[in-house]
């Protein structure tokens, strides 16, 4: 979808000489129309970062300051979109591209109030336009609440979500090593530290969230890993895994992501280790729990969420070896 608009734009535009940065493309986006020798893919989401790196693209977490052309692939969170657009606004040529379902029409209206916006290219249920505007007040700024710092675009940026609070309240005293899968900005890891964990490994795919976690948790027992939780391999097996796994890759719910977290957790635990999981009630996790653990039970919940304790991890065999 993005490739159709980007190809038309590149045929019509004369790109300035110099580096090109494309901000936040997603796995599956076809970027082949861009000149690979001067393009940097900028994303802090580890699965996307690794995907484009494997394809041979130059990748970075932060937007290069010397980029002459910056292309913003519109994210879903408006505050995050504003921050990316502010970064792009300093380039000689600034481009925004997005699907209608991601709010591109609203963003273009916002930009028209601030400056000049080209006639958009409309194709494949989305729009692409160039813009020139002064957006200094859209620059990324951290938010602080209850002593925690967050940034636009990360999960639960306006405070601890209800499921995580419920899981934190259900945790017992935790002895030994803990892994927090999908740790976000550190709310559950902080709870684990308060419950007496010897060590907490925060595993988080979003670099901005992990940056916040480093600010929020200065306890020397905390260790930080920028990694895809479903592929992370700890240096030591843990006694507990805690997680509030995501279940969206797009606007549509995709329970396979949470299932992958559960299966991965089983491979990170000692034989008598325990998974502490919070999930929306409607998500079909029973099958993966039964395949990955010998026992599981609900220990807390309400009409929307359930907190699950699972123990006796079943280690899967891969090519004749235990995973």
Image: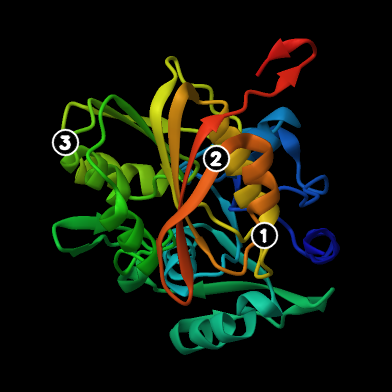
Marker disc for residue 284: 1
- Distance of mark 1 from mark 3, alpha carbons? 36 Å
Name the element at disc 1: loop
- Distance of mark 3 from mark 2, alpha carbons? 35 Å
Question: What residue is shown with label 3?
Answer: 218
Q: Is residue 60 above or below residue 96?
A: above
Q: Residue at x 45, y 65 (%)?
A: 80
Quadrant holding the C terminus: top right
Question: What residue is shown with label 2?
Answer: 295
How far from the left and from the top, in percent, is residue 137? 31, 73
Extreme residue toward the top, this view: 320
Q: Is residue 94 above or below residue 128?
A: above
Tell me, yes or no, if residue 213 can be seen here. Answer: yes
Q: Residues within 10 Å of mark 3 (few under 14, many from 20)?
A: few
Tell me, yes or no, if residue 59 can be seen here. Answer: no
How far from the left and from the top, in percent, is residue 288? 67, 45
């Amino acid at each position: 979808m993005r490739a159709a608009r980007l190809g038309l734009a590149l045929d019509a535009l004369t790109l300035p000489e110099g580096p090109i940065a494309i901000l936040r493309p997603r796995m599956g986006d076809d970027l082949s129309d861009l000149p690979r020798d001067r393009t940097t893919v900028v994303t802090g989401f580890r699965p996307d970062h690794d995907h484009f790196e494997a394809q041979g693209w130059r990748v970075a977490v932060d937007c290069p300051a010397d980029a002459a052309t910056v292309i913003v692939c519109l994210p879903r969170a408006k505050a995050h979109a504003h921050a990316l657009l502010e970064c792009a606004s300093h380039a000689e040529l600034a481009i925004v591209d997005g699907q209608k379902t991601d709010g591109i029409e609203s963003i273009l209206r916002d930009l028209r109030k601030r400056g000049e916006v080209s006639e958009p290219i409309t194709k494949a249920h989305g729009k692409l336009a160039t813009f020139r505007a002064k957006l200094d007040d859209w620059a990324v700024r951290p938010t602080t609440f209850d002593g925690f710092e967050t940034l636009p675009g990360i999960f639960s940026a306006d405070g601890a979500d209800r499921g995580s609070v419920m899981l934190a309240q259900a945790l017992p005293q935790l002895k030994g090593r803990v892994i927090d899968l999908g740790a976000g900005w550190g709310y559950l890891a902080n709870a684990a530290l308060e419950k007496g964990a010897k060590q907490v490994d925060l595993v988080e795919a979003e670099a901005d969230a992990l940056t916040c976690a480093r600010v929020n948790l200065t306890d020397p027992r905390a260790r930080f890993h920028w990694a895809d939780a479903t592929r992370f391999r700890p240096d030591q097996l843990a006694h507990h895994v805690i997680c509030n796994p995501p279940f969206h890759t797009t606007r549509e719910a995709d329970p396979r992501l949470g299932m992958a977290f559960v299966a991965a957790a089983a491979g990170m635990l000692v034989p008598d280790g325990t998974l502490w999981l919070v999930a929306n009630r409607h998500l079909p996790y029973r099958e993966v729990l039964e395949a990955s653990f010998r026992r599981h039970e609900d220990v807390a919940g309400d009409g929307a969420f359930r907190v699950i304790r699972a123990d006796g991890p079943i280690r899967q065999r891969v090519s004749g070896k235990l995973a």
